[in-house]
Image: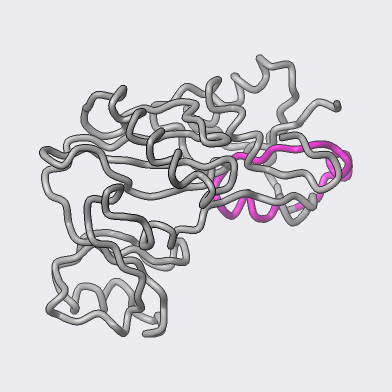
Amino acid sequence: MHPTTLLLPEKLDIEIEAVQNAWMQTGNPVQLLGKYWIKNDSLVTQPLAIYGNQAFAFVLAQLYNKTLLFPDDTIIARLDQRWTKRRITQTTLGALTEAMFPIFIKPVVPKMFIAGVLTSLAALQERTQGLELTEPVLTSSIISHIQAEARCFVLDGDVKDIACYEGEADLLTGRAFVTGFLQENAALFPRSVVIDVAYAEPIGWFILEFNASWGAGLNGCNAGLVLPCIAAATVNEVTDVL
């Protein structure tokens, strides 16, 4: 099997540098890309893994004929409330009424507007100015007094690492919660995925959201432990390096 080259943005932050160092310790090469939108012919036939922001990853996937794995964000609206601990609905901007506020609102299409808790319809209209009323969104009832939020990197239904990025909670019970969730729901996700969870008394752990392993920050997770998730998140069309 040919070595897999990890493509990273030239401008490194602490987390990307940790991924770079862990990858190099495996003996596989790393390529830092500045003008990443210009095709590097030497990379065309190589097995590649991509790690970076959405624009970086999407451009590279197109240039080098790779497929990026990412979860369907709307899955969360169809989950049993045993896992979400709150009411989550997929709807549109135009379907929201004043009586629904305050409410957490997130765009289905990433980056269309900043997700968050909004207190009024006027505040929503200001934040989403210029968008069509048919724009799909996810809404959620609000859980107050969240004590911790944690990130889990998952591969083939197995939690490779979990770490709190906000607050503190027992990560052993957090891992057990995610493992139980995956035992019932792993088939809904690509083989590599990031699952964010939160903890609040008295309801315990619950699912926050899902992210793609190729673009999710470590948020306290061990770079070496999650490398298999990052590698698997890029599917090579000719040589499968998962």
Q: Is residue 201 left or right of residue 239?
A: left
Q: Is residue 16 magenta?
A: no
Q: Residue extending furthest front?
A: 184
- Residue for point 79% across, 39% down: 240
> How many discs mark residues in the rendered view?
0
Q: Nearer the viewer, residue 47 or 24?
A: 47
Q: In this figure, which colouring scheme has been used for the structure?
A: one colour
> Relative to residue 197, is residue 159 drawn left or right?
right
State left or right for residue 193 relative to residue 113: right
| Image-quadrant location for residue 156 | top right
Question: Which one is nearer the viewer's eye here, 224 or 39?
Answer: 224
Give percent across and percent down for residue 172. Answer: 31, 22
Image: 59 above or below 120:
above
- Residue at image coords 39%, 27%: 220
> Percent x, y for residue 173?
28, 26
The part of the chain drawn in magenta is 38-60
Nearest the viewer among 31 and 106 is 106
Quadrant in which the C terminus is drawn: top right
- Residue located 56% across and 34% down the image: 155
Quadrant where the image shows the N terminus: top right
On screen, 107 above or below 98? above
Q: Residue 201 location, x and y as percent?
A: 12, 38
Residue 93: x percent and y percent? 33, 79
- Residue 98 picture quarter: bottom left
